[in-house]
Amino acid sequence: MFPAVLLAAVLLLMPGAEAVWLELPPSGTKCVSEEIQPNVVVLADYAIMYESHPTSHPTVAVKVTSPYGNTVHHNENATTGQFAFTTSEAGNYLACFWIDSAEKGSGTSLNLDWKIGIAAKDWDTIAKKEKIEGVELELRKLEAAVESIHHNLLYLKAREAEMRTVSEKTNSRVAWFSILSLGVCIVVSVLQLWHLQGFFQKKKLI
């Protein structure tokens, strides 16, 4: 019982599964995004919910892109579907949906079940394959959850270090730009004084 409670507490501390209900308009695109680190398994199921718009039965197109714009999944004329991939780039993965059929009606609703990391694992299959159950299975889940949290913390630490480096470089550039601007102002002021002095001397005002 204790491992199950501890596992539930650990899972509350990390993102994993997310169910999203999207209202797709007759024209236009609806997108959802998730920031994911590299080498993470992503699994998602999507399906049109005709109950909310019973008078029309459109189909949808879906396109999933990586942070660098690479297409990891593309499907057209779909009512249901699934995509699964392992991330190779860190950043925001974008999933976009739109109605692509001639029959658009007043739009449609789509349910997206998005699972990441440990939530995407098929624990039933793992339990049958490795012949584990009960407390041992819960401990395996707990171990996977702790490992995932550890990787997330390392990723966040690396991102923090990267942001700190960028911030320090930006501050350094701003400081040098300020010094350069001050130097330019001083040089311009000296030239203006020199020019005015020569002008007044020619006019015999000084």
Image (cartoon, rainbow, N blue to C red):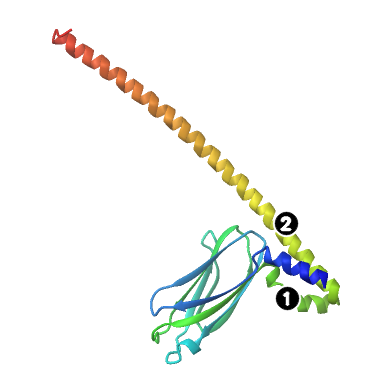
Looking at the picture, tell me which residue is in the foreground, 84 or 193.
193
Q: Which mark, residue 107?
A: none
First in residue order: circle 1 vs circle 2: 1
Left or right side of 88 for 199:
left
Q: Position of residue 176 (x, y in %)?
A: 46, 30
Residue 130 placement: quadrant:
bottom right
Q: Which mark, residue 150?
A: 2
Foreground label between 1 and 2: 2
Compared with 109, 118 (above or below) is: above
Left or right side of 9 for 198:
left
At label 2, counting other C-alpha atoms closer than 10 Å, the crowd grade (few under 14, some 14-19, many 20 or more) is few
- Please name the residue that numbered disc 1 is placed on: 122
| Quadrant location of the N terminus in the rendered image | bottom right
| Quadrant location of the C terminus in the rendered image | top left
Dot 2: element: helix
Q: Position of residue 123 (x, y in %)?
A: 76, 75
Compared with 126, 6 (above or below) is: above
